[in-house]
Image: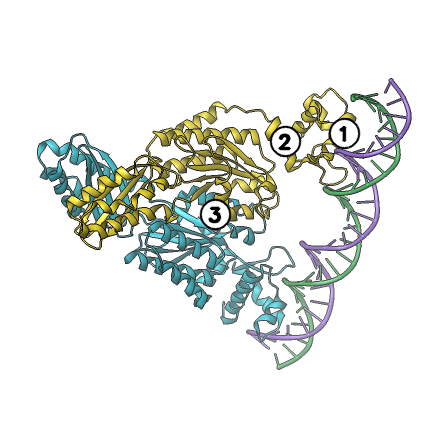
Chain colours: A cyan, B yellow, C purple, D green
Amino acid sequence: MLDDRRMAVLRAIVEDYVSTGEPVGSRGLVDRHRLSVSPATIRNDMAVLEEAGLITQPHTSAGRVPTDAGYRLFVDQLATVKPLSLAERRAIQTLLDGPLDLDQIVGRAVRALAQLTHQVAVIQYPSLRMTRVRHVELIELAPARCLLVMITDAGRVEQRFIELPIPLGPEATALLRSRLNAATAGPTLEEAFDDLDDLWIGFAEPVRPAVQAVVKTLKEIPKAGRQERLVAAGTSNLARAASDFRSFMPVLEAIEEQVVLLKLLTEMSADSGQVAIRIGHETTQAGLEETSLVAAGYGPGRAVAHLGVLGPTRMDYPGSIAVVRAIALYLSRILAA
Amino acid sequence: MLDDRRMAVLRAIVEDYVSTGEPVGSRGLVDRHRLSVSPATIRNDMAVLEEAGLITQPHTSAGRVPTDAGYRLFVDQLATVKPLSLAERRAIQTLLDGPLDLDQIVGRAVRALAQLTHQVAVIQYPSLRMTRVRHVELIELAPARCLLVMITDAGRVEQRFIELPIPLGPEATALLRSRLNAATAGPTLEEAFDDLDDLWIGFAEPVRPAVQAVVKTLKEIPKAGRQERLVAAGTSNLARAASDFRSFMPVLEAIEEQVVLLKLLTEMSADSGQVAIRIGHETTQAGLEETSLVAAGYGPGRAVAHLGVLGPTRMDYPGSIAVVRAIALYLSRILAA
DNA sequence: AATTAGCACTCTAGGCGTGCGAGTGCTACC
DNA sequence: GGTAGCACTCGCACGCCTAGAGTGCTAATT
């Protein structure tokens, strides 16, 4: 039913429509793509494709436009990988240079992603739940006041000041520090938390409330919400892409709301560097019916967070996929260092 | 020349145009504002106002629209303070609740600002240069590796890991810690830096390179750029306000660029809680000719940073001023705590 | 059976003219 | 100085029309 030529026609329609933005007709199709058949034949093929729900015409006697299903088939079976240009590789390479501050890395990456795809880029901050603890530091600042510092393998540093119910003393502080490190080394932060509940047993009766206070603070860090945050860049690219401006107000809203996008991102792909795509209505979000999301997980080893680009369904999928994958891999590599 | 009634006419024109978005004519003006004169008289007044460059007509035989100069006169002399509603006060009050994390405070404040003004809100993070140091902590993690933590009076915490050229030892570490605190207590961070250059004198010859390394790291913190950052919210409000969408693409760009907006914000007002306004071309930025900025400084005591709202020149200035001032004051109060 | 040529048909975009209405500016008058 | 009246200007919405692009269908061709 859907033989080779018809697939070629679909691919050609997608490519032309993506690059021009105009509905594409049978004549222009044969002209631009060296199809060795006549427009009439193409018309028949298009009728079949339309019957199959892959393309549609905005109005009678206009050219055809891919439907969401058409894009889906295109990305799943028809799209060829588009290798990055040298300039693109260069741009990403420069991400590796310079300081290691997590904020700066993420900031640069999201900017690069937006610039290379000409879309809106979003990057989720590495989730604390999924990261492993590299080091925990406990410092006594004053008799009943201490500072808790936690460094994760995603390069993140979190610190909290703790007012203790009773002074802990230098020896108990040192002991608690080593115990905390022992308990959190290895598994992910979330898994490690169960072990923390019994930590107080190893301490003398009087200081146990202080130990509890420290453990309580530590356990609250992942809940603080800051890690479930995403940064965006390239929002001004929206204006170029969208013709009418009601179509991208929802996108801006989604970015500000964060929660919708975060949910969407996290449920998309599990593995680091694996690209997943939601096209149009597949986002299942009101207002994003004409928006696609190309996303990938990133992180040292497995994915601890996600990143992606957000654009009109009519977007350059092969190009976006290549860039998203590349940025995800580079980001993973940097965080692993 | 510009007697009372003419000023009243200007005020009425600004108010009507702001609320309706339509050019306002002489007839509607007398109807809505109980002016006890005839439309013809108003027309004469409008001719004078137009002569003075305060209003203009988009095309012959349309109503009048305020010019930038008209808005300027309005905000400087005609606008009456609009007290906040109870609901608005409530909304701001809730900012005070909850945890003290700087990120969260700023995040909530910018959201509130956007929501209450229905504009795009921006808040500059408290600048490190202008803040005072509340506490400096230096912790020896390993023989030649230590952690430097700095807490500012704006509630900000910065930390850096330092690889030392040679081990410092516990006594020298303690001494350096107290010296650092002594040197930075009192003046602003920038002022304190001069004193740091001589700090190594008080230390034994062998550890001096390590002291230098710590001082160098400390001095680099304000340059790290992170503090010169601003967060935005309410960008989706742009779509409602602007009629054509080319007019707000520059706004999105300005927010992403940051540097332009930061410059604009910092050169606007010096005192905490003092509201300053740039109208249209007064922003002296290409692309922001139809955009106004209502901004205020905030901070404990004097202003350490700025915040504001960004909207079309046709905006509710009295309302925006009230909200901006309120948020600035609340934010200052929270940071002072 | 697939492909092609030809043709009638449909629909949109854009140009053009027109009447309407809002609003002005001017002049004469109070 | 303020007002009434009036002619004038201009943008806007509407209706009309045409050109052009593109289709679907049928019949002929390979």
Q: Is residue B122 left or right of residue A154?
A: right
Q: Nearer the viewer, mark 3 or mark 1?
A: 3
Q: Residue at x 46, y 34 (%)?
A: B297
Residue indicated by mark 1: B43
Q: Quick one: SS at disc 3?
A: helix
Q: CA distance from mark 1 to mark 2?
A: 20 Å
Q: Which amino acid, mark 1?
A: Arg
Residue type at tag 2 = Leu
Nearest the eye: B180 or A320: B180
**Residue on which disc 3 sits:** B259
Disc 1 crowd, CA 10 A, few/some/many (<14, 14-19, 20+) = some
Which chain's residue wears label 2?
B
Total number of numbered discs in the rendering: 3
Residue closest to the eye, A4 or A234? A234
Q: Residue at x 33, y 39 (%)?
A: B156
Answer with the quarter of the image where residue A337 lies: bottom left
Q: Which residue is mark 2?
A: B73
Question: Residue B136: horizontal and vertical position, in percent?
Answer: 27, 40
What chain letter is assigned to the residue under label 3? Answer: B
| Residue A224 seen in render | yes
> Tag 2, which secondary structure?
helix
Q: Are marks 3 and 2 in contact (CB under 8 Å)?
A: no
Q: Is residue B110 left or right of residue C17?
A: left
Relative to A30, say whether B286 is above or below.
Answer: above
